[in-house]
């Protein structure tokens, strides 16, 4: 869905623009996904699993823009994509269409500047406007920064998914399940 651009002041004095991600961002988004997948194990993909073409990514971003129940925010600093955050409906079925799922990631060099807080704040504001009643997420049990961000933004821990992830080194990680009433 389309939505108004927002500017925020970062802790280092720079400005960050939160705007809808667009098909023109496809190549930058792929580079971002590859790089961040290598910077942390807290994301779902390994870098070699970022295999979409620029055309496929552009089509995905176009769909997000046209979907009235989904949002993809690009966070832009000095003209460069610093990160993104998104939500989409859990499903269209009537019994669960009151819920949406969210995701967020930033390049490491843009951590701790307040972008995560601003992105989650804008995501929840837009989800509420659309009419969702609850936002859900899953976060690695060892992702302390992620959990701290979500708690700061009003998310509540509600459960745990055992051995949700198996890393290439053979070790497992649980997911912590969190939700925020909108
Ligand atoms: C999680 C993530 C989005 C946080 O974004 P961010 O812009 O750094 O967060 P903010 O600067 O807005 O900080 C928000 C709060 O989170 C907490 N926090 C963030 N990073 C932290 C860290 N390294 N250690 C401890 N707390 C941290 C703090 O409570 C902070 O509030 P404060 O600045 O008032 O102290 C970022 O670390 C990231 O992209 N990580 C890699 C991808 C990822 O884990 N995504 C989530 C998958 S579920």
Image (tube, rainbow, N blue to C red):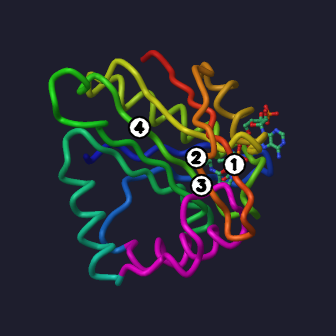
Mark 3 and mark 4 in contact? Answer it, CB < 8 Å: no
Q: Earlier in the sequence, mark 1 or mark 4?
A: 4
Look at the image and tell me in which quarter the C terminus lies: top left
Q: Name the quadrant where ligand 1 sits.
A: top right
Q: Residue at x 27, y 81 (%)?
A: 55
Mark 4 and mark 2 in contact? Answer it, CB < 8 Å: no
Q: Which residue is drawn at 19% across and 41% down?
A: 68
* Magenta span of residues: 25-52
Q: What element carries label 4?
A: strand
**Residue 105, numbered circle:** 3
**From the viewer's perspective, is the residue at label 1 or at label 4 nearer?**
1
From what the image shows, is residue 177 above or below residue 69? above
Q: Mark 2 points at which residue?
A: 164
Report crowding for label 1: few under 14, some 14 to 19, many 20 or more residues within 10 A (C-alpha): some
Q: Earlier in the sequence, mark 3 or mark 2?
A: 3
Q: Distance between the residues labelled 2 and 1?
A: 6 Å
Q: Residue at x 53, y 78 (%)?
A: 31
Report crowding for label 3: few under 14, some 14 to 19, many 20 or more residues within 10 A (C-alpha): many
Mark 2 and mark 1 in contact? Answer it, CB < 8 Å: yes
Q: What element carries label 1?
A: strand
User: 160 left or right of 53?
Assistant: right
Q: How far apart are marks 3 and 4 (CA)?
A: 14 Å
**From the viewer's perspective, is the residue at label 3 or at label 4 nearer?**
4
Q: Distance between the residues labelled 1 and 4?
A: 20 Å
From what the image shows, is residue 56 above or below residue 141? below
Q: Distance between the residues labelled 3 and 2?
A: 19 Å
Q: Name the residue under label 4.
A: 101
Percent coordinates x, y for residue 95 in the rendering: 20, 21
């Amino acid at each position: 869905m389309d939505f108004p651009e927002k500017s925020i002041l970062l802790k280092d004095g720079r400005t960050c623009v939160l705007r809808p991600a667009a098909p023109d961002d496809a190549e930058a988004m792929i580079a971002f996904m590859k790089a961040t997948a290598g910077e942390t194990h807290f994301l779902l993909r390994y870098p070699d699993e970022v295999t979409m073409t620029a055309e496929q990514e552009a089509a995905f971003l176009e769909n997000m823009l046209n979907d009235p129940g989904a949002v993809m925010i690009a966070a832009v600093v000095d003209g460069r994509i610093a990160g993104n955050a998104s939500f989409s409906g859990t499903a269209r079925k009537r019994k669960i269409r009151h819920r949406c799922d969210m995701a967020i990631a930033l390049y490491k060099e843009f951590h701790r500047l307040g972008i995560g807080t601003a992105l989650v704040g804008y995501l929840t504001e837009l989800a509420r406007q659309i009419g969702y009643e609850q936002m859900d997420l899953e976060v690695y049990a060892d992702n302390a920064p992620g959990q701290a961000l979500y708690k700061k933004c009003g998310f509540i821990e509600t459960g745990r998914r055992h051995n949700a992830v198996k890393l290439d080194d053979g070790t497992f990680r649980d997911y912590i399940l969190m939700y925020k009433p909108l």
